Amino acid sequence: MILEARGLTVGYGSHAVGSGFNVAIAGGEVLALLGPNGGGKTTLLKTLLGLLPPLGGEIRLADATLTSLSVRERARHLAYVPQVHSGLFAFSVEELVLMGRSAHTPLLAGPSQRDREIAWATIERLGIRHLAEKPYTQISGGERQLALVARALAQEPRLVIFDEPTASLDFGNQGKVMREVRRLAADGLGVIFSTHDPNQALRHADRALLLRDGRTLALGRSHDVITQENLRALYGTDILKVGTGGEAAFLPG
């Protein structure tokens, strides 16, 4: 396992948002955190990343407790791709991707030739070479998300965590980003992503953790736990199932 959390309680300060979480992720695997807004997905992700301290339980990363590792040590194993945003500074895409090398660069030192080669390799991999010199603030939402994925890969992590990776993206760019999620797993990385779309979790995740009101409603293989009955309990509404087997999809009733 790359990362494992047991008996995890998450929240802010002394206020618990969720508890009883058991999360494990191995290389080559995609885990989806699925649930409605306010269910605890983002708080759980931030805790797994070390951005929030756990209020209970333990998280282990690289055979050590997550809280015992420095920010730089965590960044050599964990990469984070946030929801796409506009950005405040007009860094070029190349500069943005190079920021992913900071975990491997000595303090106050500029990027080395190797850092630049790794950054360019991830830019090529994501098919965004033509964007390298463009300001991040002046490219499309889908292009920004691919640039953020490139930055994460430049860290050379073992696990990549996405927070609603296709939020606000058009249909075509959703497909590009989710294909890259599967490609990362095919290359041996672990991937965790949060979503409120059961069809996205069903199609792109090997396993799913269903969260509601800060609790685990179900955890297991996606096709086993993403069911009409579980989704009705998860979202509190009627759910329609269209198709069967690998072609099944769910719609609000």
Image: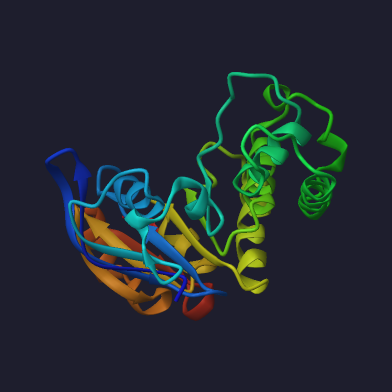
Query: Is residue 114 visible to the viewer in this orientation of the structure?
Result: yes
Work out whether 7 lies above or below 124. below
Image coords of residue 158 (percent x, y) = 57, 64
At a point 17% along the width and 38% down the height, the residue shown is 13
Q: How was the colour assigned to the protein in this rendering?
A: rainbow
* Quarter of the image where the N terminus is located: bottom left
Quarter-of-image position of residue 97: top right
Is 192 left or right of 88, judged from the image as shown? left
Residue pictured at 30% horizontal, 46% vertical:
43
Q: Along the line of sight, which residue is nearer the eye, 123 or 68?
A: 68
User: Looking at this view, is 202 or 78 the one in front?
Assistant: 78
Tell me where residue 86 appears, x and y as whole percent.
59, 25
Residue 79 vs 233, above or below: the answer is above
Residue located 62% across and 40% down the image: 170
Give the x, y percent position of residue 175.
Answer: 65, 54
Q: Position of residue 83 (x, y in %)?
A: 51, 39
Q: How many labels sit on residues? A: 0
Q: Front-most of 146 and 141?
A: 146
Vertical position of residue 203 compared to residue 141: above or below: below
Judge left or right: residue 64 versus residue 102.
Answer: left
Residue 79 horizontal side relative to residue 184, left or right: left
Q: Which residue lies furthest to the right in this view?
A: 130
Q: On the rendered image, what quadrant is the C terminus found in?
A: bottom left
- Is 86 on the left-hand or right-hand side of 43? right
Tell me if residue 164 can be seen.
no
